Image: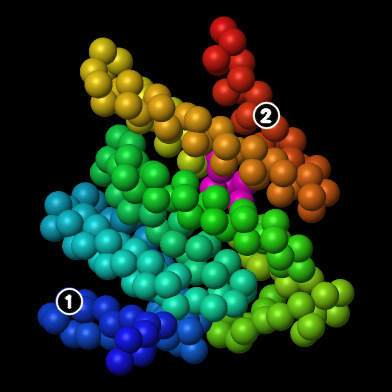
């Protein structure tokens, strides 16, 4: 029947095992991915091994695909924020240990998702992403009605995402041939990056958070300065 089950997604993982993802199971899946990422960190502290690196990237790519499915089935602002925080982090961590810069397609996806995340936070003022929050149960849906002051505070850092996005853009330019077409194409992405920085500035102005606001304004001015000079 048309439209039936369109909010459920089935993911085929290693060994051909199919897993269905629904909004009800989002938090358990996020917890499993976070635990798996923690195990990868301990592996990265060991001496370099091509086999381990290949396995890590395969697992990380699978985690990103799962998070993309979770974003498709997320229905509440809290669910979308939680998934986007995990998804952007996973993109930045994808091959940080072996690549000179973040793959451009991965970077573009991260940029779109950061824009999405900022948009949700601007449209839903009762949700806030902060580096320091009180402890909360990661497996439970949270709403403004359930908070004492009506604000759901979620652990994370938008400014860190913006910083990393900007740094990865600069790193890619440093590693591309300045006389090549790929370099010129990459330069065109600065307009989108600048818009993301401006959106983050608007978010922090609205939330009245001076420290991250100052950091993001500095980033914006650096792009203006580099264009003028």
Q: How is the image coloured?
A: rainbow
* Residue 155 appears in view: yes
| Picture mark count | 2
**Residue at the image position 54 percent from the left and 78 percent from the top:** 75
- Furthest toward the right, the residue is 149
Which region shows up in magenta?
Answer: 158-163
Place of residue 37 in the rendered image (x, y in percent of width and height, measured from the top left): 38, 67
Q: Earlier in the sequence, mark 2 or mark 1?
A: 1
Place of residue 22 in the rendered image (x, y in percent of width and height, measured from the top left): 42, 85
**Residue at the image position 35 percent from the left and 28 percent from the top:** 186
| Magenta span includes 161 | yes
Up-down relation of residue 201 to residue 92 (above or below): above
Query: Would you call the spot at circle 2 few (<14 residues within 10 Å), some (14-19), or many (20 or more)?
Result: few
Quadrant the C terminus occupies: top right
Query: Would you call the spot at circle 1 few (<14 residues within 10 Å), some (14-19), or many (20 or more)?
Result: few
Compared across the picture, whether 61 is left or right of 158 comes to: left
Quadrant the N terminus occupies: bottom left
* Residue 39 appears in view: no
Quadrant hosting residue 16: bottom left
Disc 2: which residue: 218
- Numbered badge on residue 207: none
**Residue at the image position 69 percent from the left and 61 percent from the top:** 123
Disc 1: which residue: 14
Place of residue 144 in the rendered image (x, y in percent of width and height, measured from the top left): 76, 78
Compared across the picture, whether 52 is left or right of 192 comes to: left
Place of residue 146 in the rendered image (x, y in percent of width and height, measured from the top left): 77, 84
Q: Secondary structure at mark 1?
A: helix
Q: Secondary structure at mark 2?
A: helix
| Magenta span includes 225 | no
């Amino acid at each position: 029947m048309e439209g039936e089950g369109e909010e459920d997604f089935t993911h085929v993982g290693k060994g051909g095992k199919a897993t269905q993802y629904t909004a009800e199971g989002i938090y358990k899946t996020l917890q499993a991915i976070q635990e798996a990422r923690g195990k990868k960190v301990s592996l990265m502290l060991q001496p370099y091994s091509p086999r381990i690196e290949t396995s890590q990237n395969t697992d990380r790519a699978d985690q990103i695909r799962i998070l993309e499915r979770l974003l498709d089935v997320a229905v509440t602002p809290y669910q979308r924020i939680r998934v986007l925080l995990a998804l952007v982090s996973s993109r930045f961590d994808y091959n940080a240990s072996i690549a000179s810069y973040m793959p451009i397609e991965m970077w573009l996806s991260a940029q779109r998702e950061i824009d999405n995340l900022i948009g949700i936070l601007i449209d839903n003022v009762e949700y806030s992403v902060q580096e320091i929050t009180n402890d909360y149960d990661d497996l439970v849906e949270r709403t403004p009605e359930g908070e004492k002051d009506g604000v759901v505070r979620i652990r994370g850092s938008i400014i860190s995402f913006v910083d990393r996005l900007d740094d990865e853009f600069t790193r890619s330019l440093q590693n591309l041939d300045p006389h090549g077409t790929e370099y010129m194409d990459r330069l065109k992405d600065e307009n989108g990056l600048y818009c993301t920085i401006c959106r983050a500035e608007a978010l922090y102005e609205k939330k009245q958070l001076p420290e991250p606001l100052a950091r993001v304004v500095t980033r914006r001015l650096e792009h203006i300065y580099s264009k003028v000079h």
